[in-house]
Amino acid sequence: MTTDEVTAPAAGAPSDSAPSRIDRAQHLSSSKAQRRRQLRRRRAVAVVLLVAVVGLPFVVWRAIPRGAGPPKPVTPPVLGTSVPRPLFLPSLVSLVAKPTIFPGTPPALPFPPAGQSAVFVQGVGLLGATADQQSVPIASVTKIMTAIIVLRDHPLGHGSGPSFTMTAANHAAYIHDATNDDSNLLVVAGERLTERQLLEALMIPSADNIADYLARWDAGSIPAFVKKMNAMAKALGLSDTHYADASGLNPESRSTAVDQAILGSFAMRVPGLISVEDHPSMTFPVEGTVGNFNPVVGVDGVIGVKSGFTSASQGCLVTAAWRKVGGHSVLIISSTLGQPLNLPQVGQIDLQLLDAAASDLEARPILRAGQPVAAVVAGWTPQRPHIVVKGDPATVVGWGGLPVRTVVTPSIPYTRGAPNGWQAGDTMATVQVSTPGGVQTMAFATLDRFLPPAPAGWVPPSSTGSTVASAGN
């Protein structure tokens, strides 16, 4: 027996040095099973993660109430800053007395014995008037409103406006007025006149034919233009004034001295009107040089306004003149109607009224510089600082018996964010001093000392929070 035969194992017998085939098969089968189990576990984890990633938005969406929209991002406050809180405003309580009366007695003006008169001070009020204020014919004084409407609808600015070519019909209208001895301006076919020249013809030689021409140009017809005139009179509160034409030839164009004094003051504020009437004479292309029917234009500060005369109206004149009162330039308007005199004599009546009115006027300080006009009230502090008049005294032009009203209007500065309070010198209000003719002067009012803001967490006692109360009388 060879050595190999002795040492070689028998066929099918187990070997001490290597696993048998059965063992190797069993070992391979166990390894594969373990790898399969690991792969299944990994797949299960992947599926769970996938479901979580894909399904989470759906779950969140389902949790949001319908109509609420997506959740809004919340931005955290930056370190070192504070979150803004509401700024509550204080209120102002007026310290100004109720409407005061200008010291002195009402003036006595030298009114004429016939007709009616009135004197109005622009921006101040009606100085005086005769008792017999009845609506009467006003002749060419009507043209004040005609000029106002034309300049309102067609402002001149710094130019002369559009240019117009006169026709044979315009010349015929001149012939008609000249034949009837109505005031007029000679025009011929082919002559060119600007809007400014037409307004100068309306106000200086008081041309009736030009009044009708301007009315038709502005509104298409004289009745349509008259409707505008009456609408303006109503808007200005001229309750005793009614217009029937653009020229004043119709005696149904009627008014009172008071209404015309007020209208004269308004007219002097219309841009362009003074520049077309403040001339003692004017030169036109064909007519040549003509004088102003207002006999006192250019005399002693007189800058307007308009004269009128018919048999129905008698002498009528509205006069405006500048006068100096306590260093202030004041425009005084005198209106005189129904005078059985010629126009130069009516002009002298108005000049006397203007001079007498100027002597009755004076300028008085109503509020002094530094005067307290309101107390500042804040619910979060017992402090009661004042606001005081800043700058020069508030001076008013007036006469004895004139009512004067002072109104304090809050303008408290409002700043969003965490406030630092209001400092001394901060402007807290405006102060307006007015008389029946309007606001005469305005001043600012400033805080006289520091006012702290409402502390954090402070809640107003009322549900509406703090308010800013207007102060006045």
Image (tube, grey):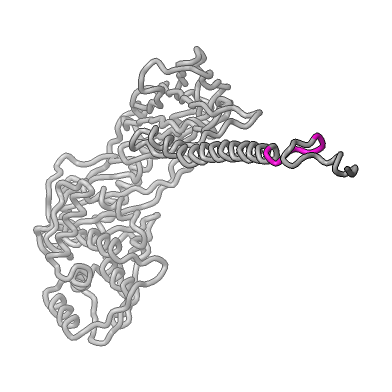
Main secondary-structure element of the magenta-colored stretch: loop
Taking the image as shown, residue 346 lies to the left or right of residue 384, namely: left
Q: Position of residue 107 (x, y in %)?
A: 30, 35
Q: Could you say which quadrant of the image residue 67 lies in?
A: top left
Q: Is residue 315 magenta?
A: no
Q: Could you say which quadrant of the image residue 430 lies in?
A: top left
Considering every residue shown, the one lying at the far front of the view is 1
For this rendering, which residue is in front, 431 or 6? 6
Q: Position of residue 319 (x, y in %)?
A: 30, 54
* Residue occupying image coordinates x 19% and y 58%: 229
Vertical order, 127 against 244 (above or below) = above
Which stretch did the figure color magenta?
16-22
Q: Is residue 94 in view?
A: no
Taking the image as shown, residue 469 lies to the left or right of residue 414, namely: left
Taking the image as shown, residue 331 lies to the left or right of residue 426, namely: left
Q: Position of residue 460 (x, y in %)?
A: 42, 18
